[in-house]
């Protein structure tokens, strides 16, 4: 080692770091070179380092592993929740679609029934959907989605294949109000199908109607079918109206009465057939 | 205190490099990230060339031993990183963030180049010179080393481990 003050010492001091760099690199290269010839060399150093570091690695790995495990679990729960929400939305959409298709199927069936009925009876009309009911409990009317623009006229009869429904009493552009036969103001000229006895059917504002002005000598029995008579051109002739539920014959008086159950499901109407106002071979309408 | 801090920092980055980094980074990014450069460059910039080189030698050899690779390859790379960081720090009179960034980038660059050169010298497998991996290794490690250097500098001053000037954001 050169003594202090010598040029060599000054040189070494000045270039200490550079020389150290070179020395370290040269030593490293020699070490690397040795390992190239003897790959199993320096195992003691390696083993010592690994032995010292491995407990720390195990600890950190365990901590990180549990944290990432928790995170993965959280993400997985989030994923499941998201998927669950998506599936629920899909179920709701499919349910709605199924409901709509059922509705369409039902309507298609009903329209087919209307078409068959029209063919059988020769009555022409347009199908209308019920879009509302009377907000007044004292009247029994419905609102349908067909009006003047679709050919509905005031007085047009409304029917279903099962039986008479009522009569249009108010028409606007694209909707109409139909008075049901069970409305207290409704009057329908009818016949007892079996005995051909004539009478007037009046509504009772409940689920039934009353047969009035039936001569007490006329033959009528429970279960008899009541049909329209076609008188006064208010309704087409022969449309089924209802069935006799009860015959009321008082001791005195000229007439007997009967309670009639309408054939058409008036409390759960969804679609009706509005017949052409001018019936074939018949004249002007009368008022209900 | 300083010795404990030094040992802890070196051990910490080596353990993290071998545990946390492989867990959170995908392969290509993982291969480029070298946390072991953090203490080497940090000590080079704050304590000078000699400290940088000695830290580099220690960290590099430990890293080689832990990876089971040829002892000395990372040693050379980290020694060069420590030397370059220290020389650049003294040359540029590092204080502002720009000079620090330049010193860090220089240290990382020379570390990568020296590692590449040693691998080439001994015919070991290495990435292509034109591989984007080298660019990622340079950029990623420079950003990491600079970020940690700033954090560690602040921590050392605040904790009283080192009494030096605070990092200036201007050059």
Image (spheres, coloured by chain):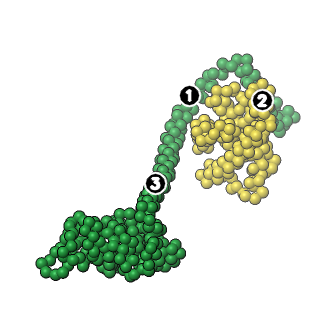
Q: Name the residue under label 3.
A: A98
The reply to whether residue A83 is in sight is yes
Quick one: which chain is green? A
Q: Can see residue B153? A: no
Disc 2 target residue:
B118
Q: Nearer the viewer, residue A82 or A129?
A: A129
Q: In the figure, is residue A65 to the left or right of A33?
A: left
Q: Which chain carries label 1?
A: A
Judge by depth and name the residue closer to the eye, A2 or B121: B121
Against A90, residue A125 (above or below) is: below
Residue B20 relative to residue A263: left or right: right
Q: How far is disc 2 from disc 1 in space, using C-alphas?
A: 27 Å
Spatial separation of the CA atoms under disc 3 and disc 1: 67 Å
Q: Residue at position x 67%, y 27% from top?
A: B69
- Colour chain B appears in: yellow
Residue A174: x and y in percent read 50, 75
Name the N-terminal-most of marks 3 and 1.
Answer: 1
* Side of A56 where B100 appears, left or right: right
Q: What label sits on residue B162 in the rendered view? A: none
Query: Counting other residues with Cα less than 10 Å from the Cα at mark 1, is it few (<14), some (14-19), or many (20 or more)?
Result: few
Residue A97 shown left or right of residue B84 in the figure: left
Check disc 3 and report its element: helix, strand or loop: helix
In the rendered image, which residue does mark 1 sit on? A51
Label 2: element kind:
helix
Q: Locate residue A176, reporting x and y percent.
A: 45, 76
């Amino acid at each position: 080692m050169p003594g202090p003050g010598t040029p060599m010492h000054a040189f070494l001091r000045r270039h200490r770091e550079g020389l150290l760099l070179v020395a370290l690199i040269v030593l490293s290269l020699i070490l690397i070179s040795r390992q190239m010839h003897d790959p199993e060399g320096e195992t003691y150093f390696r083993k010592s380092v690994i032995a010292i570091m491995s407990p720390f690695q195990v600890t950190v790995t365990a901590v990180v592993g549990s944290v990432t495990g928790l995170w993965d679990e959280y993400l997985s729960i989030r994923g499941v929740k998201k998927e669950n929400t998506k599936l629920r939305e899909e179920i709701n959409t499919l349910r709605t679609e199924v409901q709509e298709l059922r509705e369409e199927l039902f309507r298609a069936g009903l329209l087919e029934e209307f078409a068959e009925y029209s063919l059988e009876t020769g009555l022409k009309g347009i199908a209308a959907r019920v879009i509302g009911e009377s907000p007044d409990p004292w009247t029994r009317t419905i609102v349908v989605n067909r009006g003047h623009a679709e050919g509905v006229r005031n007085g047009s009869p409304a029917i279903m294949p099962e039986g008479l429904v009522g009569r249009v009493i108010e028409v606007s552009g694209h909707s109409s109000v139909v008075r049901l036969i069970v409305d207290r103001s409704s009057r329908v000229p009818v016949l007892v199908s079996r005995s051909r006895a004539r009478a007037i059917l009046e509504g009772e504002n409940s689920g039934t109607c009353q047969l009035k002005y039936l001569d007490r000598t006329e033959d009528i029995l429970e279960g008899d079918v009541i049909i329209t008579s076609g008188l006064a051109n208010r309704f087409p002739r022969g449309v089924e109206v209802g069935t006799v539920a009860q015959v009321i014959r008082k001791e005195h008086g000229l007439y007997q009465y009967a309670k009639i159950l309408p054939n058409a499901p008036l409390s759960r109407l969804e679609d009706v057939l509005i017949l052409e106002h001018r019936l074939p071979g018949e004249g002007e309408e009368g008022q209900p | 205190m300083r010795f404990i801090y030094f040992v802890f920092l070196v051990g910490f980055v080596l353990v993290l490099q071998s545990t946390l980094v492989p867990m959170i980074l995908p392969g290509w990014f993982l291969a480029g990230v070298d946390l072991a450069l953090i203490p080497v460059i940090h000590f080079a910039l704050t304590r000078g060339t000699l400290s940088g080189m000695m830290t580099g030698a220690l960290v590099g050899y430990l890293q080689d031993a832990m990876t089971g690779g040829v002892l000395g390859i990372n040693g050379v790379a980290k020694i060069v990183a420590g030397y370059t960081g220290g020389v650049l720090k003294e040359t540029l009179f590092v204080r502002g963030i720009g000079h620090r960034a330049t010193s860090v980038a220089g240290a990382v660059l020379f570390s990568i180049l020296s590692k590449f050169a040693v691998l080439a010298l001994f015919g070991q497998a290495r990435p292509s010179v034109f591989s984007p991996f080298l660019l990622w290794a340079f950029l990623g490690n420079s950003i990491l080393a600079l970020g940690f250097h700033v954090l560690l500098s602040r921590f050392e001053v605040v904790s009283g481990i080192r009494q030096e000037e605070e990092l200036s954001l201007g050059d």
